[in-house]
Image: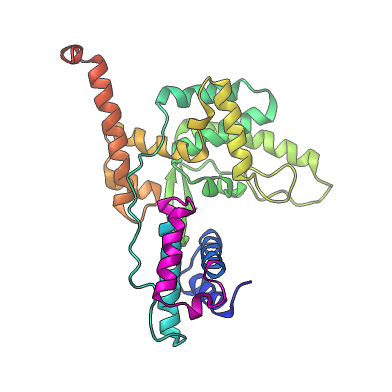
Amino acid sequence: MTTPQVEAFLEMMAVERDASPHTLSAYARDLADAEASLGAPGLMGADETAIEAWFASLSTRGLSAATAARRRSAVRQFYRFALGEGWRTDDPSRRLDAPKQGRTLPRTLSREEVVALLSAASAREGASGLRMIALVELAYASGLRVSELLALRVESVRRDPAYLIVRGKGGKERLAPLNASARDAVKTWLTARDGIQKLGRPEKAPDSPWLFPSATTASHLTPRRFAQMLDQAAMDANIDPARVSPHVLRHAFATHLLEGGADLRVVQTLLGHADIATTQIYTHVATDRLTKVVHQHHPLAKGE
């Protein structure tokens, strides 16, 4: 059960810091976990020893460093808020050290594998194939997050724009480019989509506002369903489904841009990263792949 103090903290995060529903949900779970683990004193009554013991227990429970870091952040921000509100006179989380996180390189696909995915989608008959082509083309051409991609509204593409205006994390807007191939795929899907919408809804009922409407609900296609569709396309393309996900298409967009010589700052802007350090990880992926190509194909590297 959420305490009044936690509810007030989450309300502050939503109103003053414009936190997304996803962030608020994650912080609510993190604080609920801390409350449950601390027992009777709860967050408001815990001392430094109890908070440090809770944090130490996260690793023994098998949680990743990334998850532990987020839970630490949630608890530390809660206590800063509690101090500011005068609910506590001390911060029992002040000595928590951030867990060390190793650098994990993002999974990506080669250009040939992206083409293979599109070919597999093209082999599908009917509207499902056209929808899949549009989804993959849009994700790969623009680098959209899956939440941004699936939340696209149909009116945003009716006039065949060269760019989309996307509202990303923190409510920040950015331009996402669309190449000719993606625009053609969207136009073809729109024709099929509109036909399905006319057949599937009662007379005078409003059209779905979503570019990729769900077939079973009034909302749009879910990330889980899109991931399932990608798994099938990967298998059809003889690619290990474990290597393919909606987010991997975003990784491929960034990696291939950098391999092609794009400026890191431009890629940062296109991805909507607040910190360029987040974008820099793609330079390691691109460098590793280019090094491999040189070693495989340069005549003086053959004997190495």
| Viewer-closest of 95 and 196 | 95
Q: Is residue 217 above or below residue 15?
A: above
Toward the left, the furthest residue is 300
Please name the colour scheme applied to the rendered image.
rainbow
Say if residue 84 shows up in the picture. yes
| Viewer-closest of 249 and 245 | 245
Residue 222: quadrant of the picture: top right
Q: Split into 4 quadrants, where in the image is the N terminus?
A: bottom right
Residue 36 relative to residue 64: left or right: right
Residue 267: quadrant of the picture: top left
Query: Residue shown at 45%/62% (left/top)?
Result: 71
Q: Is residue 166 above or below residue 239?
A: below
Q: How many marks?
A: 0
Query: Residue shown at 35%/35% (left/top)?
Result: 255
| Viewer-closest of 101 and 133 | 101
What's drawn in magenta, residue-wise? 37-66
The spot of residue 231 in percent (x, y) is 58, 31
The spot of residue 64 in percent (x, y) is 44, 50
Say if residue 260 shows up in the picture. no
The spot of residue 244 in percent (x, y) is 50, 32
Question: Residue 280 magenta-drawn?
Answer: no
